[in-house]
Amino acid sequence: MEDNELLKVRMEKIAALKAAGIDLYPNDIKPQNTSSEIFSQFSNTESDELAQLTQKFSIAGRLMAMRNFGKAAFIKIQDRKGQIQSYIAKAILSEEAYFVFKKLDIGDIIYVSGKLFRTKTNELTIEAEELRLLSKAIYPLPEKWHGLTDIETRYRQRHLDLISNPAVKETFYRRSRIIRLIRQFMDKRDFLEVETPMMQSRAGGAVARPFKTHHNALDMDLYLRIAPELYLKRLVTGGLERVYEINRSFRNEGIDSFHNPEFTMMEFYWAYATYEDLMSFTEDLFTDLAMHLFGGLKFSYQGTEIDMTPPWKRISVYDALVQIADIKPDVLQDKVQTADFAKKLGCEVKETDPLGKTWMAIFDEVVEKKLIQPTFVTHYPVAVSPLSRRSNDQPDLTDRFELYISGREMANAFSELNDPADQRDRFEQQIKEREAGDDEAHEMDEDYIHALEYAMPPTAGEGIGIDRLAMLFTDSASIRDVILFPLLRDKASIKE
């Protein structure tokens, strides 16, 4: 039957229900049970024991399937916890309730109440003594609702995706659990959860292109934050020595399987700690999550076993380029030769780029995708680390690491730069890069430098991508699978 014909049939049913005085959208029903609760309590209860029960059970949810046998039927109702079967019989329901049942369609929200029994096939079932329509679905579910696979439809109409694919719902339940577990982990270690501004007068805390907006009442331009870092470090300066924020940040960048312009991350700052302390801390956090979610430290991600058993591999950027990208050490020390090597790989590099920036272009192109098992990559160049503390032994490098798992960055951390003079020099270098055409370079932030001039204690800080973490722990291939409403191109702008 064509969609317009199906819609016509539904509208006729709606008219009949209204003519009979049936409220299509009542608001006086409170189900007392969920499907999982019933199965948990009675999954092993035999038929004769169920027959002795006097208790009535009630659930509400979406009608997902119907097998009609004339004056009786079996239906499937899906609530937030799963599905359960209900038996509908004309001889049991009131005349009005049975009339309503005959006007139901797949997709309607309904309520049933009655006793439990087992069918001949041993399926736990509610024998409906009461049935109510709670919300009439005007439009039918998509033809493939029992396994909606069209990516465009799934992301644009997440409500249909959640209805049609139970595994999607489980993904977001797990994502929520991951965030709860992170909070518990941080709280147990005396970190204070805080909130910092999402609209900022300067886009700071990361090297990224911001979104710009305007506040009418104050007549001032503002930026959606690219990171909460500079505000969190102000709090450390103020005496909140262990702080964290699970935050939404925004970066005006490309969209792919690992990037969404609006994303969630956790940043935390720990006074009197170093980046080396954070490596151990990160191992503890990730292994704690794995133990809670999988009951062990090995699990499969996209067909590859990930082993989180500590200690994790540690390798410097320099050594990774030599060992994995197969660059000779003497080439790495020469700016021209390194740039030539990068260009042969197809990297976009400029003559004005500092050597460290070219290193990272090669790293991103060659090394990153080969880091499958948990790996800490350390000692990033100062040129790409404007907020990191210089290494005492190698002043052109920083006390910084990034964590890679399954070929992608999962966390970024460093011992914080708390020398205001050095920080000013770094910002000034970033300004030069911005003037040379790098619109992702960091801006000068006089207020932040002024805060450092009141003395920030030696501190280590870290950012962890919550979306990518959710991808890893839900075996999701795309970041869009773990964001309920990923940003998509407006349908009207898509050319036929």
Image (cartoon, helix red, strand yellow):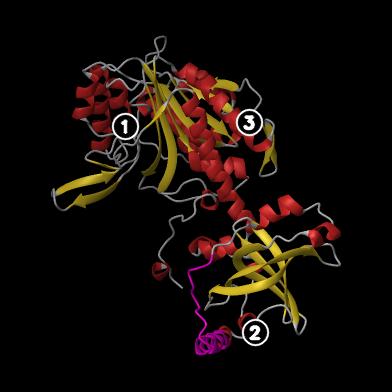
Residue 13 numbered tag: none
**Residue 80 lies within the magenta run:** no
**Residue 11 lies within the magenta run:** yes
- Left or right? Give the position of 413 relative to 201: right
Q: SS for tag 3?
A: loop
Asked if 280 appears above or below 32 in the picture, the reply is above
**Magenta residues?**
7-29
Foreground residue among 341 and 425: 425
Q: Earlier in the sequence, mark 1 or mark 3?
A: 1
Mark 3 burial class by Cα count in 10 Å: few <14, some 14-19, many 20+: some
What amino acid type is highlighted by mark number 3? Answer: Gln
- At 44% from the left and 35% from the top, the residue drawn is 266
What amino acid type is highlighted by mark number 1? Answer: Thr
Query: Pointer 1: what residue?
Result: 352
Q: SS for tag 2?
A: helix
Mark yes or no: residue 253 visible.
yes
Query: Pointer 3: what residue?
Result: 373
Query: Pointer 2: what residue?
Result: 95
Q: Nearer the viewer, mark 1 or mark 2?
A: 2
Q: Quadrant of the N terminus?
A: bottom right
Q: Position of residue 142 (x, y in %)?
A: 59, 73
Mark 2 burial class by Cα count in 10 Å: few <14, some 14-19, many 20+: few
Rendering quarter of residue 315:
top right
Q: Nearer the viewer, mark 3 or mark 2?
A: 2
Rendering quarter of residue 494:
bottom left
- At 78% from the left and 81% from the top, the residue drawn is 69
What amino acid type is highlighted by mark number 2? Answer: Glu
Q: State the separation of the CA atoms marked 1 and 2.
A: 82 Å
Q: State the separation of the CA atoms marked 1 and 3.
A: 35 Å
Q: Nearer the viewer, mark 1 or mark 3?
A: 3
- At 54% from the left and 85% from the top, the residue drawn is 17
